Image: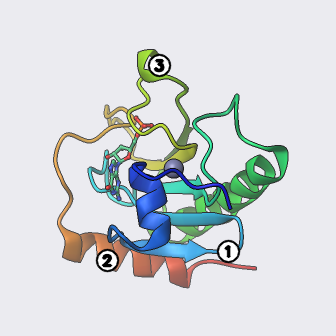
Amino acid sequence: MNSSENCIFCKIIRGAVPAIKVCEDEYTLTFMDINPAGPGHALVISKAHAANLLEIAEPDLLAVTRTTQRVARAVQKALVPDGLRIGQFNGAAAGQTVLHYHVHIVPMREGQRTGAHGRAPGDPEELKVLAARIREALED
Ligand code: 5GP
Ligand code: ZN
């Protein structure tokens, strides 16, 4: 599996940096965003390192997309948001801060005005509870 030494998401995949995980399979890992834009903000990443949409191999892209739908359905069932924002940035100029392909799943409430990025770290205990609720709502 293609990995990058100093990439923070590759470190999470290797277990060198902790993360509050929701689920994983052969090609993808889903965990809670450390700086949530709102309750339930999760990230779906490819296990193989690729910087962005332009570089990711098709099987990894398809796997991330499949996982995104599966987790989005679980978020909808568990947290019942009014909407779901699914986002992905390519390049620093577009707002990408971690150069490892990932998709944001951000549950949205009516009238909520947050972007894809939060401003402060989430409470780890709260993130663990949200991750467990999402995990329990996952279907095959
Ligand atoms: P980007 O701007 O690249 O689309 O977003 C990167 C996201 O990754 C941000 O929302 C940021 O909060 C999140 N993030 C950055 N470093 C870490 C980390 O070490 N752990 C977790 N769980 N999330 C991270
Ligand atoms: Zn990486």
Frontmost of labels 2 and 3 is 3
Mark 1 and mark 3: Cα distance apart in space: 29 Å
Pointer 3 residue: 94
Pointer 2 residue: 128
Pointer 1 residue: 25
Tag 2 secondary structure: helix
The x and y percentages for residue 48 are 65, 55
Q: Front-most of 1 and 77?
A: 1
Picture disc at residue 38: none
The x and y percentages for residue 71 are 60, 64
Mark 2 and mark 1: Cα distance apart in space: 19 Å
* Residue in the image at 36% along x and 55% along y: 33
Kind of residue sitting beneath label 1 = Asp
Q: Quadrant of the C terminus?
A: bottom right
Mark 1 burial class by Cα count in 10 Å: few <14, some 14-19, many 20+: few
* Residue 55, quarter of picture: top right
* Residue in the image at 57% along x and 55% along y: 3
Mark 3 burial class by Cα count in 10 Å: few <14, some 14-19, many 20+: few
Q: Front-most of 69 and 109?
A: 69
Kind of residue sitting beneath label 3 = Ala
The x and y percentages for residue 139 are 70, 79
Would you say 1 lies left or right of 43 here?
right
Among the two numbered marks 2 and 3 on one chain, the one whose residue lies closer to the N terminus: 3
Tag 1 secondary structure: loop
* Residue in the image at 44% along x and 79% along y: 133
Q: Is residue 4 above or below residue 115?
A: below
The x and y percentages for residue 62 are 80, 51
